[in-house]
Amino acid sequence: MVTLSYPRILPAGDTALIVEFGDAIDVEINARVLALDRLVAASAIPGLVETLPTYRSLFVVYEPLAVSYTELSAALDRLLAEVPARPVPARGRFWRIPVVYGGEFGVDFAAVAARLDLGEAELIARHTAPIYRVFMIGFQPGYAYLGDLDPSLHSARHEVPRLKVPAGSVSIGGIQTSIHSVEAPSGWQLLGRTPLRLFDPTRPEPFLLATGDKVRFDPVPAAAWDALAQRVAAGESVAE
Amino acid sequence: MSAALRVLVPGPLTTLQDGGRQGWLRFGLPPSGAMDKVALATANALVGNPADTGALEITMGPAAFRVEAGSTRIAFAGGEANLTIDGKPALLDRSHSLAAGAELRLSLLRRGLRLYLAVRGGFLAAPVFGSTATNLRAGIGGFAGRAIAAGDELPIRGGAIAEPELRLPFGLAPPSHPRLRVVPGPQTEYFTADALATLLSAEYAITPQADRMGYRLAGPRLAHAKGFNSISDAVAPGCIQVPGEGQPIIMMADRQTTGGYPKLATIISADLPALAQRRPGDKLRFEEIGLDAAREARRLLRDWLSQLPGRLLPVVPLIDSERLLTANLISGVTDGSSS
């Protein structure tokens, strides 16, 4: 087994590179990613196009005709020296998100409960207990990857992805849990759904969640869905 | 009265695409934009637009449009198809000024996969997150965030056109390379040592599962060394990611911004426009390139594009396309030794 030393910089083609801080889903690693992201945003590196913070790495898009890979790596190395070993995670906002679990709203809910040998009430209790951190927005517009999922709930993805998973689905994929933002294919296990829209291009704030935000799921009965969905459609916020 | 194009036949997938949107990866929005940016720039140059102006990306054809109210100048670039204007054959590699009522009809593409239709001044579409590029999955950009449909009226930012029509010089072609050049990584360590060698030596076919998000390929299996579930991270343009069954997927303009499949190599930016014209069934070969050489390839293409507007020629009315198509251009034959 090769022992890797972090952080390390890797090319991702000729117009992007990746600064990796580790190979784990970890609050401290994610906080270091965000700390470098803020330093890069405040820097005046020529040729910088945009950045994308992920669980454990910062993706940096650049114009190679304005700055070479070598020059950019050197500039990032200098910024890396300023990243604290244990940055204080940014506070972020706190969201309580209503979720209807099971039935038509979470078509995998019963099967996941059975496979994990948990009662349905217990599965809901374990999924709603943690305050999750938004580690990454990606995959689709506004799609939120959350951690840390209770290890007793880890569930493999479907071998064949579903072609249409509704927006607002709350799911488990391996050791991650997430909220889906738009209707799209997905292989993740669908536990429930929120009427909330993580992505709505017509809203003043089109993207609801940001990396570093905290999320807690609020179980609501299926009977409450229609009223909640109407309030969301009317532009009202049903999250707190 | 400002001009507009009425969609008579939209084709299987026609969307408005421009240079793409930048700065929204962190919110999960890919750049989108034209798959073949060289063709986009060429069509725009022919009508006097900046290179990244939004144009219709017509996939495969056939398609047909009618000019409604006002007049406009149009040009096509990218794939090859038969074009008629008001029923008469017309050349693709030049601009055409059209009055209200003119009808454009394009056949199925006989070469390439995407043909761009640019109009003088561009289409009138509101930028969403800084771009008019259509992203179907997000439902944004272009015309109402969707592909165009029969009956749509596409408004044009028009204006009077006095300059001569422009055409491409014969034989003008962008820099090209027979193989797709790749920079290894960023996750070669997730693969066996053989995987990269296999990618660089074998032939891969584009499967029918090829769209604006990505091209699934079929060929020799690329073996993972330590499973195929990496922690989801960013997906670069041209990224070659490999799911569990070992068949590569090339990520394109509408790709997901992050993904968890290991990423073996990344196709360089200069080779993506040509790839966008390859069809399902086409065979692809790859070769390794260093970052300095990749940068030179990008510079070469950028220079070619920046020189393009200056290399276009005016269409001389006396030998316009119609005459060329009907005239007898040979006035005599020699055996080649008398000259």
Image: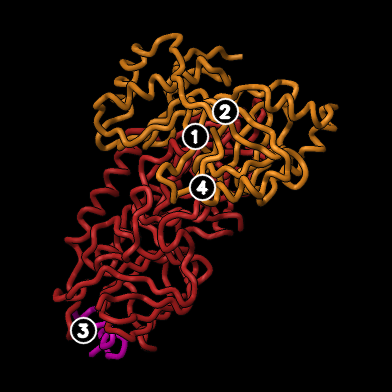
Chain colours: A orange, B red
Q: Is residue B287 above or below residue B277?
A: above
Find residue A194 and report its image quarter: top right
- Could you tell whether A23 is left or right of B39 in the image? right
Identify the residue position indicated by label 2 in the image: A215
Q: Residue furthest top?
A: A85
Report helix, strand or loop for mark 2: strand
Identify the residue position indicated by label 1 in the image: A209
The Cα atoms of the two marked residues, 3 and 1, are separated by 61 Å
Q: Are marks 1 and 4 on the same chain?
A: no
Which kind of residue does numbered mark 2 sit on? Val
Q: State the residue in front, B184 or B56.
A: B56
Q: Is residue B338 magenta?
A: yes
Report helix, strand or loop for mark 1: loop
x%, y% of residue B190? 59, 27
Q: Which residues are magenta?
A: B320-339
x%, y% of residue B30? 45, 45
Which kind of residue does numbered mark 3 sit on? Ile
Label 3 environment density (alpha carbons within 10 Å; few <14, some 14–19, many ≥20)? few
